[in-house]
Image: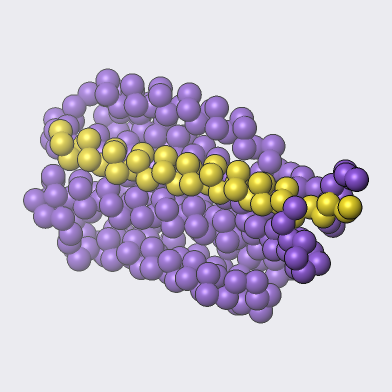
Amino acid sequence: MEYVIAAYALSLGPVALYLAHLVRERRRLLRDLDDTRVRPG
Amino acid sequence: MSARPVPLAPASAQPASGVDRLWAALRGPSGWLLALLAAVWLVSVARAPIDSVQGVIQKILYVHPPLAFAAYLGFALTALGGAAFLWRGEEAWDRLARSSAEVGVLFCTLVVVTGPIWAKGTWGRWWSWDLRLIVTLLLWFVYLAYLMLRSFTEGSERAARFAAVYGMAGLLVIPLNYFAIELAGNRSIHPENLERGSLGEGMGLPFALGAAVCLVAFVHLLARRAEVERLRGLLAERLALAPRGQERG
C-alpha cells in the first residue's frame, strides 16, 4: 500500500507545486508590467 | 501635478494572437474541470477492485500510463508548435512549443518516478534495462536537452529555429517508446500496452478518469505556462523600450 501512496503523492505533489509556481510567476509578471508604465509629470 | 500613467507600447497585457487567446479562454474552465475530475478520480481509484495477481500495487496503473499519455501530448505539441513557427514565423507558436516541452518534461519525469515504484513492488527491483524503460529514459533526456537548449539561448531566433527542428526530430522517439515492448519481443518484462477489454471489471472507469485528469491537467498547466511565457516576452519588450531610469513607476 505504501508504494501506491508514494506513487500518487509523487505524481500529484509536483503537479500542484508547478501549478503554484505558475500562479505566483503570473502575478509577479503582471505586477512588474504594471510597474513599467511611464508616469509623466 | 499628477498625471494618469501612460502605458508603453504594446498597450495592454491582453493576449493579441489567436493561440494566446485560446490559452486565456481555457485557463479558467480547465482549472475547475481539473479539480472536479481529480476528486472523482481519487474516489474511483480508492473504490477500484484489488487485482488478483498483483494486489493493491496494480492501482499505480491508474496514474502511470495516463502520465505517459500527457507527456506524449506535450512532445507532440512541441513538434507541432515548432513546425508552425518555422512555417508562419509567429512567436506565439514558438511559445507553444517551448511551454508544451516544459509541461511534457514534467509529466515524463513523473512517469520515470512512478515506474520504478511499481517495478519495486512487482519485480522486486527499482530498475531493469528493459527496452521500454531505456527508450522512456531516452525520451526524457531528449526533451530535457531541448529545455536546456532553450534556456541557454534565450531570445535568439536562430536558436528557436534550431529548437523547432530538434523538437520535431525528437518526436520520432515516441512511436519507438510506445512499440518498444513489441520490438523487444519476449525479452521485455514490462507489461504490454493496454488494449480494449484488457482491464478487469471495475478497472476501466478509474483508468479512463486517470487519463482524463492527466490530459486536463496538461491543458491547464500549458495554458498557464504559455501565458507566463507571453508575459515574460511582453515585459522584456517594455523594458527595452523604456527610457533609462523610467523602467519602474
Task: Classify residue B89 as left or right of residue B147.
Answer: right
Vertical relation: B100 (above or below) B65: below
Q: Residue at x 32, y 64 (%)?
A: B137
What percent of the width, then of the height, locates residue B48?
A: 27, 24
Q: Say which residue appears at 54% left-offset and 42% top-offset.
A: A23
* In the rendered image, the vertical position of residue B172 relative to residue B100, given as above or below: below
**Coloring scheme of the render?**
by chain
**B216 left or right of B173?**
right
Estimate the x, y position of residue B221 in percent, counting from the top left: 53, 44
Residue beneath the point at 90% across and 45% down: B1
Q: Answer with left or right where residue B93 lies relative to residue B100.
A: right
Q: Nearer the viewer, residue B207 or B93?
A: B93
Give the camera-side residue of B58 and B175. B58
The answer to whether any part of residue B2 appears in the image is yes
Relative placement, left or right, of A37 versus A9 is right
Q: What is the x, y in percent for residue B157?
A: 68, 75
Q: Position of residue B134 (x, y in %)?
A: 28, 66
Q: Which chain is yellow?
A: A
Quadrant in the picture for residue B77: bottom right
Instruction: State the purple chain.
Output: B
Q: Residue at x 32, y 36 (%)?
A: B62
Q: Is residue B122 above or below residue B244?
A: above
Q: Quadrant of residue B210?
A: top left
Q: Residue furthest left?
A: B124
**Location of residue B168 (image quadrant):** bottom right
Give the residue at the far front of this rendering.
B1
